[in-house]
Amino acid sequence: MENLENQNIENQNSINLDKKESDFQSRIDMIELRASLEKVKSEIAKVIVGQESMVEHLLAALLSNGHVLIEGVPGVAKTITAKLLAKTIDVGFSRIQFTPDLMPSDILGTSIFNVKNSEFEFKKGPIFSNFILIDEINRSPAKTQAAMFEVMEERQITMDGIRYVMEEPFLVVATQNPIEHEGTYRLPEAQLDRFLFKINVGYPNLEQEITIIKNQHESKREDKTEAVNRVISAEQLKSYQQLVKEVIVETHLIEYIAKIIINTRENQFLYLGASPRASLALLTASKAFAALRGRDFVTPEDIKEASYAVLRHRVIVSPEREMEGLTADEIIRQILEGIEIPR
């Protein structure tokens, strides 16, 4: 009798094991996505030394279908990294150099009178592409920045009462110098909120600096980007973006995201906390980081990793604390340390 019971238990365990394996096999397959993004990293690494964090965040934004603001002093490879990323994807590319005299029509396009048919025709501006690189976005005043509001949020523009929808994928990567540099304008909060990430880029370390100098000394190419190849098609990218939406997020992690955002609103060191748009951005970005790691489920570490780039440009440090030298990143770190990590 005892042997029969043991046999039944073994059979039941076998059934449960088979069920677990079946469940595991039915999970989302991230192998192709991860392999493709590793190829992208390899192509970028042919030119860029270090800056792994910037590249990781750019790829996460790409998977999230979100825009990116990159801030750093001149010469730390902000623009060239964005150009290299665009080159690895088989999509349309457009670069816009923002200047103090740039007008909204220089970005969006304008209506021109056609003498032949006596009608106005809309001539599309450089914003009509897939991958838009805006160099030194804070060199243009608020009037020009306002032209980007609709297209960044709704991926469309409205001109003369006609709606023009952007072709997917559509991604804006903007670079800017720190605000304390001369000849720059502070971006409106409404525009900052439309960027999924703000990536801060620092200087390379000694080892990386030596490698950069050596590579330049030994290079025989005039154009460094020539060595970089396209590795992802537009259709692949769109399928990867769809795949990321299916990444699993447990209820307790959704609550964890909500607690982080609520804490920014109640924090005594912050003049302005994050909006519900930040909650959604943190959710989406966490899924992208999970996919980059080859997982089909989000962990608390994914959320913490995404939090800094998602929140640092969406919160405003109170003037008193800012004068004391307290930064948004330090406050975000304190918030993350003060919330119990769900397990």
Image (spheres, rainbow, N blue to C red):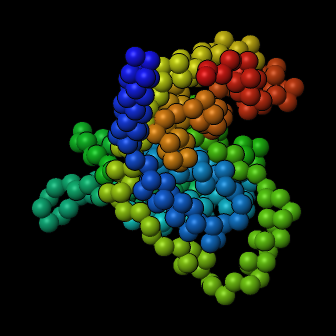
Q: Does residue 194 appear in the picture of this structure?
A: no
Q: Residue lying farthest left? A: 117
Residue 78 in which image quadrant? bottom right
- Relative horizontal placement of residue 115, taking residue 304 as reference (left or right): left
For image coordinates 59% across by 80% down, the residue present is 223
The image shows residue 238, relative to residue 275, as above or below, that is below
Q: Residue 76: percent from the left, percent from the top?
A: 72, 59
Q: Does residue 223 appear in the picture of this structure?
A: yes
Q: Residue 228: percent from the left, percent from the top?
A: 53, 73
The image shows residue 258, relative to residue 196, as above or below, that is above
Q: Residue 233: percent from the left, percent from the top?
A: 37, 62
For image coordinates 68% across by 17% down, the residue present is 340
- Relative horizontal placement of residue 245, taking residue 123 as reference (left or right): right
Q: Residue lying farthest front? A: 1
Is 340 in front, or is 215?
A: 340
- Relative horizontal placement of residue 306, taking residue 51 as reference (left or right): left
Residue 22 in which image quadrant? top left
For image coordinates 28% across by 46% down, the residue present is 165
Residue 315 in which image quadrant? top right
Q: Name the quarter where the N terminus is drawn.
A: top left
Is 40 in front, or is 309?
A: 40
Q: Residue 137: percent from the left, percent from the top?
A: 58, 49
The image shows residue 244, relative to residue 269, as above or below, that is below
For image coordinates 79% across by 78% down, the residue present is 214
